Image: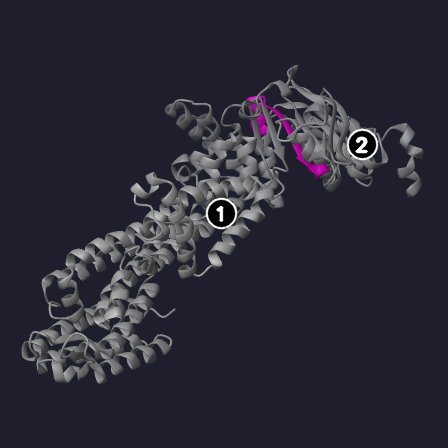
């Protein structure tokens, strides 16, 4: 592997991809200007919406990022990708402020195709750099934390205050955080319940050959039901239960709302958690188990001290899958009144307001991405090479 | 003392261990030798109740082990297997400390025991205590496995192919180590192997198994001279039987008192007769002087005496081995 900073490291398909994306970003519309929040936009290029000095600065930084994509090692790529993302964010905010200042209080400025292409190119460059540098799991965790801090910093600095998505946020800040809480509660809470059921179930299936196939098949079938259909299917039995058991209704359990969404997410989560627990336990090397038994560990001690610790990376892989999957699926829960970020997505679709859709979609994507990176780092921390 | 009394194990129709009875004396080494599928591992695993007998019983010092809780029994008996089964998520020290921790020893005692055993097995505690098994060579893993089995100072040590995964050069050293440690602690050692050479080298008694049955249980010397069945005869080999007999006797044991004849080759008393014979043939001499560890002469051995010891019993002169030539 080439470690030099200025050698064309594997002359570089990545260089072409990133350069193409960044060039398109500069050529295309950085933002689009809307006279109001539902009218179609009017594209504005980098040079049309930024002061010349800032436009030149952005061009220079993106050019440097292109050069890094062709010739740079891991660290220059990382630096240029981070710098590029920051510059793109600042440019978008400044452009929005300038355009709305002249466009009147109804006008909206949303990120344009150029912005998204540029962001995509830079994220690709960033991910490539992170792979090249081979960050340790702990470093990856800190990196996610740092990225979150930067995002919050941008958000609260006010530089984005005139960007359309933030305008939508301002109009419903309280709703945003409430739905965000529900979103996380749905995804993480259902995961926790799934772990409480699935891990013991996986342990049980290890011992019961007879139950293994039927239960795994059942979970498999549940997994193949489309999410909307499963949400719908749960409405009937839950409303029946609520109608016949007033206590349940009083506890807020009903045919629509959070309850069926939560239940559906739990059901979806069971297969990965259960199956991975079983696979992890069965992957414990036979000599290790034989030695543990021969030394006088009771079956409970074997489970707690040997089998579960050794199965942990595989179990966590299942948990990672479920967490990322649930953060996405929780968006759909809004369809049956379950709440979550999906509320904004479906409101936005209903009102024909793309910025509102983004207000729901962006945090879901960011959450899922962060969860994936964090879980991968945790898995790497628990995994140990075989003897 | 471990006694097997009419021990039998059946899996469905197959009888894996078939009515085996013999007694392993305390503080000795017994090797169970047989081909794979002969039932030798199953026999071993019935001693710590990893396998439950279909009928018959095993007694340790007269106590029927069926009356002891399996996990309590196992904590009293050391156990090692071919691939060592070290816990990959435990350090070397934690691996060795497994059974003492189960027994609730105080931490200071555990730590002292771990360091003592690591030192005994030539693994510097400062260097190796905190390593993980995957950071060790095969030979080091094997030694950690044996150290772990001995950590709670068991009277009995069961070993299933303890040297099977080692290359020949390390294997011989590991066998010597084991023998030294066994006699130091006075452990009753029961080991399973398919290698007759290894059994003859290590064991005070050898049990040969075939198809679940015990073919012969005898000290190596007796087995070499009087193999009970054709299978035992085949296992101990026919061509170098004489040399194997010689390898069992040291010069110290064979030395005749009195001053050595002139021109005798001086050799250390710890050498076996087999090695001494080779030295004599190579140096074209007829006699050797036995020299003790302190350099003092301990008598002499003549070439003729060695050859006499290598001769088989009269009856086998006309036996099958002779006819085949």
Place of residue A248 in the rendered image (x, y in percent of width and height, measured from the top left)? 34, 41
Quadrant of the image containing the C terminus of chain B: top right
Q: Which numbered disc covers residue A280?
A: 1
Foreground residue, B202 or B311? B202
Residue named by callout 2: B310
Foreground residue, B231 or A258? A258
Q: Would residue B54 appear left or right of B101 to someone viewing this image?
A: right
Q: Is residue B192 magenta?
A: yes
Could you tell me which residue is drawn at 25 percent across and 65 percent down?
Answer: A347
What's the magenta region? B180-199
Q: Secondary structure at mark 1?
A: helix
Name of the residue lying farthest toward the top: B62
Q: Secondary structure at mark 2?
A: helix
Q: Chain of mark 2?
A: B
Q: Is residue A79 magenta?
A: no
A108 above or below B130? below
């Amino acid at each position: 592997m080439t470690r030099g900073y200025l050698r064309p490291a594997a002359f570089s398909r990545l260089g072409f991809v990133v350069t193409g994306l960044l060039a398109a970003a500069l050529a295309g519309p950085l933002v689009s200007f809307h006279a109001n929040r539902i009218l179609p936009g009017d594209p504005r290029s980098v040079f049309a919406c930024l002061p010349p000095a800032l436009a030149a600065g952005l061009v220079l930084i993106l050019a440097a990022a292109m050069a890094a994509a062709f010739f740079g090692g891991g660290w220059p790529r990382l630096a240029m990708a981070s710098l590029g993302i920051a510059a793109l964010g600042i440019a978008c905010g400044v452009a929005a402020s300038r355009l709305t200042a002249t466009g009147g209080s109804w006008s909206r400025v949303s990120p344009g195709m150029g912005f998204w292409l540029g962001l995509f190119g830079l994220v690709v460059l960033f991910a490539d750099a992170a792979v090249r540098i081979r960050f340790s799991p702990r470093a990856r965790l800190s990196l996610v934390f740092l990225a979150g801090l930067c995002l919050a910093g941008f958000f609260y600095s006010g530089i984005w205050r005139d960007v359309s998505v933030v305008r939508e946020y301002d109009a419903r800040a309280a709703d945003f955080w409430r739905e965000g809480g529900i979103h996380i509660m749905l995804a993480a809470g259902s995961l926790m319940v799934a772990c409480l059921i699935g891990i013991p179930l996986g342990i049980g299936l290890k011992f019961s050959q007879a139950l293994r196939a039927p239960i795994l098949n059942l979970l498999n079938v549940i997994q193949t039901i489309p999410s909307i259909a499963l949400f719908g299917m749960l409405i009937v039995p839950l409303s029946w239960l609520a109608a016949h058991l007033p206590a349940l209704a009083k506890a807020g359990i009903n045919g629509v709302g959070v309850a069926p969404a939560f239940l559906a997410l739990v059901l979806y989560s069971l297969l990965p958690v259960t199956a991975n627990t079983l696979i992890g336990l069965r992957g414990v090397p036979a000599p290790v188990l034989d030695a543990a038994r021969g030394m006088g560990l009771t079956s409970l001690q074997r489970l707690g001290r040997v089998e579960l610790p050794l199965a942990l990376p595989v179990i966590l892989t299942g948990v990672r899958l479920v967490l990322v999957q649930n953060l996405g699926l929780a968006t759909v829960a809004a369809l049956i009144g379950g709440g979550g970020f999906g509320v904004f997505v479906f409101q936005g679709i209903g009102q024909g307001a793309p910025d509102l859709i983004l207000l729901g979609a962006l945090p879901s994507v960011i959450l899922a991405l962060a969860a994936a990176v964090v879980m991968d780092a945790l898995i790497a921390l628990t995994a140990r090479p075989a003897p | 003392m471990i006694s097997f009394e009419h021990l039998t194990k059946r899996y469905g129709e197959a009888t894996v261990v078939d009515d085996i009875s013999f007694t392993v004396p305390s503080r000795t080494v017994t090797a169970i030798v047989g081909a794979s599928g002969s039932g030798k591992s199953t026999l071993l695993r019935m001693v710590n109740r990893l396998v439950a007998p279909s009928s018959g019983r095993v007694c340790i010092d007269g106590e029927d082990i069926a009356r002891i809780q399996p996990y309590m029994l196992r904590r009293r008996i050391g156990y090692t297997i071919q691939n060592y089964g070290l816990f990959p998520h435990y350090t070397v020290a934690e691996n060795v400390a497994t059974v003492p921790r189960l027994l609730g020893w105080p931490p200071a005692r555990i730590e002292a025991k771990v360091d003592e055993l690591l030192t005994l097995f030539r693994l510097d505690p400062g260097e190796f205590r905190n390593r993980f098994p995957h950071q060790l060579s095969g030979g080091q893993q094997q030694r950690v496995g044996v150290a772990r089995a001995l950590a709670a100072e068991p009277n009995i040590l069961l070993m299933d192919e303890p040297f099977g995964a080692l290359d020949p050069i390390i294997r011989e050293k590991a066998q010597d180590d084991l023998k030294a440690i066994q006699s130091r602690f006075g452990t009753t050692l029961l080991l399973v192997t398919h290698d007759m050479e290894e059994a003859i080298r290590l064991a005070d008694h050898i049990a040969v198994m075939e198809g679940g049955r015990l073919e012969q249980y005898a000290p190596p010397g007796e087995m070499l001279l009087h193999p009970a069945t054709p299978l035992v005869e085949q296992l101990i080999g026919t061509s170098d039987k004489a040399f194997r007999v010689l390898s069992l006797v040291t010069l110290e044991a064979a030395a005749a008192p009195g001053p050595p004849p002139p021109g005798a080759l001086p050799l250390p008393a710890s050498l076996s007769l087999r090695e001494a014979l080779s030295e004599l043939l190579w140096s074209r001499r007829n006699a050797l002087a036995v020299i003790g560890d302190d350099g003092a002469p301990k008598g002499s051995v003549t070439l003729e005496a060695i050859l006499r010891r290598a001769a088989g019993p009269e009856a086998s002169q006309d036996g099958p081995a002779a006819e085949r030539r």
